[in-house]
Amino acid sequence: MTKAEQLNSVAVLVPGHFNDHAVERIDRTFRRVKIERADPALVTDEMRRDVRAIASFAGVNAALMDALPKLELIASFGVGYDSVDAVHAAKKNIMVTNTPDVLTEEVADTTIGLLLNTVRELYTAEKWLRDGSWVKKGNYPLSRLTLRGRHVGIFGMGRIGLAIARRLEAFGLPVAYHNRRKVEGLTYQYHSTLKGLAEAVDTLISVVPGGASTEKAVNAEILAALGANGVFVNIGRGSTVDEPALAAALANGVIAAAGLDVFADEPNVPNALLEAPNTSLLPHVGSASHHTRRAMADLCVDNLVSWFSERRPLTPVPETVNVKAAG
């Protein structure tokens, strides 16, 4: 049997809707098995017998893994994988991969655009032009806020955080950061606590992934520390923010404005944030360009190909980095 024939015999489970380019490549290379959603109750005897991999936007829990005894690999589409139980996967000797790096620059670009839109009210200014207010009412009012003189703190100095920091330096803005630990060789000012970072800056950008360790990390205390001139931008995960506390902080002048690309219960955005005049809101489009999503799709499928042809992953997540392929 040739290598191509061997790959073509591998059953890859694809729950629900998936990236079209990834689906095309999976269909050319593997045997795709469709399922309505990532629900163990939908797993058939045939799937239990044959499925060796899952390709998914995420949402793979322990129960689904346990329902597939031949499962070797979960190829998660995206850099965040908090909805994949990677700890359970490691215990079951199941490899989990994600798609880092290929979306870094796109997300960093979006972050800067969201920050600019938040402080300079560009969306509102464009509406002013388009609805005829420029003709009827005159010039758009001066923006209350500016990037000039700001000090930016980044919560989560990983690949994307570093790319954002490089862009901020080009804007002439000083950068500080908070991580679980200091990044060796980095000259930006490090703060050992998120509150310490918020107290030291007036602009806070959250890039951290979801999960128990970051659940509602940006809360009323952090927002109060950011201060009345504070701007908060979230490009990471909605679960990292206490949204009622954020809405209250925006309404009560605890902070000045917020730019959000992610929310706790997507696509449902709290009315208090929708109605706030000092928010800039995007529908989770951080990496949403054809160019970047295609690159993410390729890396997702490349992980499948590498695992089943060379028995190694390209981009394993930390929890499963020591998982070894059998045989």
Image (cartoon, helix red, strand yellow):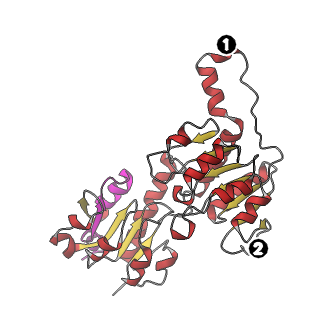
Name the foreground residue: 13 vs 174.
174
Q: Amino acid at mark 1?
A: Val
- Percent x, y of residue 123: 62, 32
Residue under the image location 52 percent in, 76 percent down: 318
Query: 197 or 7: which is nearer to us?
Result: 197
In the drawing, does residue 202 fall left or right of residue 99?
A: right
Image quadrant containing the C terminus: bottom left
| Stretch in magenta | 1-27
Discs 1/2, front = 1
Is residue 110 at least partly visible in the picture? no
Mark 1 and mark 2 in contact? Answer it, CB < 8 Å.
Answer: no
Residue 6: which numbered mark, if any?
Answer: none
Amino acid beneath label 2:
Gly
**Residue positioned 64% across, 64% down in the render:** 156
Residue at the image point whose x is 61% and y is 54% from the top: 105
Q: Which residue is mark 1?
A: 135
Q: Secondary structure at mark 1?
A: helix
Look at the image and say whether residue 307 sits in the magenta stretch: no
Q: In terms of depth relative to the viewer, which is nearer, 251 or 232?
A: 251
Q: Residue furthest bottom?
A: 327
x and y percent of residue 130 in the render?
59, 21
Residue at 63% over, 64% down: 159
**What element does badge 2 sit on?**
loop
Label 1 or label 2, whichever comes before in sequence order:
1
User: Is residue 50 left or right of 170 when viewed as pictured?
Assistant: left
Quarter of the image with the N terminus is bottom left
Farthest residue, direction right: 149
Query: Relative to 90, does residue 212 appear above or below in the rendering?
Result: above
Residue receiving disc 2 = 185
